[in-house]
């Protein structure tokens, strides 16, 4: 078990009060996933009898994030045999965060779940998620991986360091190994939609809005088909977005570095004075060291501030988060 304050062992005050829901909206972001779409649908439909027994209607909202393969055609094929299947197709690739936001806007269920189409988010957990919300009073049920088997060791190492860093510098709880796979009630979805920022980081947003959350743990599952679209570079940039979006701690780095460089420069100055008194020529060495220290501090500080200014610049543009090419 993990050591997070995640309500796993504490039931909400309204636990035991059975709640009923009418519709579950299943949001599925897709980017070049033509092979995975039919497999995902078939596997998820295995859970349909459970929800039928609870009188809960299902709907699928596939968000085609500018795919270049036949993902859209695969979704349309599902639509031909099941009118509960819907699609929002972007004019180009806007990224998973935009796809998540579009799906949340499109969903009208009083329950909503986010899932990856590659089946790394096991549909078998859906009944358990529903039970925790309907019978135990939780507002959301999140999921987290307890292992990273099958993932490159370097990526796993950086991922753990990222979550560790976020726990230290951000007041928003971001659970190690957390997935976007999450079932939520309508009030949680509405709270997320109320956050209109352009630079979105859903894992941080989920933690920021709060509400009573249950965490389910499971071991890592490999993709059912295709290849991951998350390169190391994309993951690194995504982590930067998360840090900037939910912590101002990096802005303090220039101040700390400035103090450290000032102290180092002072010590170096004392050493240079002593060496000069002993007859050594230290003028050029001293100037070089001083310039290196102060120049490095200034560049680091300017760079960090520039990242925040860039994010602010993008927010003030207030561009739409996505553009729709086709929808049904």
Image (cartoon, rainbow, N blue to C red):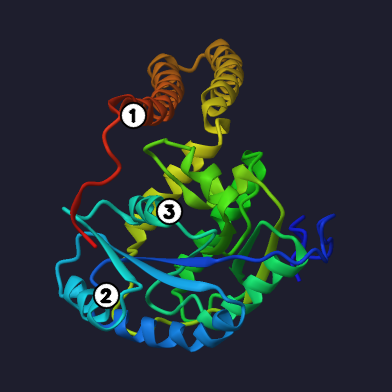
**Closer to the camera: disc 1 or disc 3?**
3
* 118 or 136, nearer to the observer: 136
Q: CA distance from mark 3 to mark 2?
A: 20 Å
* 69 or 255, nearer to the observer: 69
Q: Is residue 151 above or below residue 154?
A: below
- All told, the count of numbered labels is 3
Q: Which residue is drawn at the image coordinates 44% and 85% (left, top)?
A: 45
Q: Residues within 10 Å of mark 3 (few under 14, many from 20)?
A: many
Q: CA distance from mark 1 to mark 3?
A: 27 Å
* 169 or 14, nearer to the observer: 14
Q: Residues within 10 Å of mark 1 (few under 14, many from 20)?
A: few
Where residue 104 is drawn, which disc sits there? 3
Q: Which residue bears the numbered disc 1?
A: 310
Judged from the image, the secondary structure of the residue bearing numbered disc 2 is loop
Q: Which residue is drawn at the image coordinates 54% and 82% (left, top)?
A: 52
Query: Earlier along the polypeptide chain: callout 1 or callout 2?
Result: 2
**Residue 247's spot in the image, x, y percent?**
56, 35
Query: Earlier along the polypeptide chain: callout 3 or callout 2?
Result: 2
């Amino acid at each position: 078990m993990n050591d997070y304050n995640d309500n796993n062992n504490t039931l909400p005050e309204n636990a035991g009060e059975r709640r009923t829901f009418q519709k579950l909206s299943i949001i599925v972001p897709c980017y070049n996933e033509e092979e995975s779409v039919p497999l995902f649908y078939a596997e998820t439909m295995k859970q349909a009898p459970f929800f039928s027994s609870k009188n809960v209607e299902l709907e699928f909202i596939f968000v085609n994030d500018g795919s270049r393969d036949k993902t859209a055609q695969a979704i349309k094929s599902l639509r031909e045999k099941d009118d509960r299947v819907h699609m929002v197709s972007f004019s180009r690739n806007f990224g998973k965060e935009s796809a998540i936001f579009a799906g949340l806007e499109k969903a009208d269920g009083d329950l909503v779940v986010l899932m990856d189409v590659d089946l790394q988010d096991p549909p078998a957990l859906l009944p358990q998620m529903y039970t925790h919300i309907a019978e135990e009073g939780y507002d959301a049920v999140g999921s987290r991986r307890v292992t990273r088997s099958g993932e490159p060791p370097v990526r796993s190492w950086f991922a753990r360091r990222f979550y560790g860093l976020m726990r230290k510098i951000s007041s928003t709880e971001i659970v190690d190994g957390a997935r976007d796979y999450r079932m939520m009630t309508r009030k949680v979805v509405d709270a997320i939609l109320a956050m209109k920022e352009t630079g979105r980081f859903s894992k941080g947003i989920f933690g920021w809005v709060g509400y009573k959350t249950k965490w389910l743990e499971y071991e890592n599952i490999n993709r059912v088909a295709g290849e991951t679209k998350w390169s190391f570079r994309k993951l690194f940039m995504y982590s930067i977005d998360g840090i900037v979006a939910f912590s101002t701690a990096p802005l303090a780095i220039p101040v700390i570095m400035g103090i450290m460089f000032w102290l180092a420069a002072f010590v170096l100055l004392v050493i240079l004075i002593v060496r000069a008194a002993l007859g050594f020529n230290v003028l050029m060495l001293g100037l070089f060291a001083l310039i290196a220290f102060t120049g490095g501090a200034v560049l680091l500080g300017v760079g960090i501030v520039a990242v925040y200014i860039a994010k602010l610049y993008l927010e003030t543009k207030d561009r739409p988060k996505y553009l729709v090419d086709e929808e049904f």
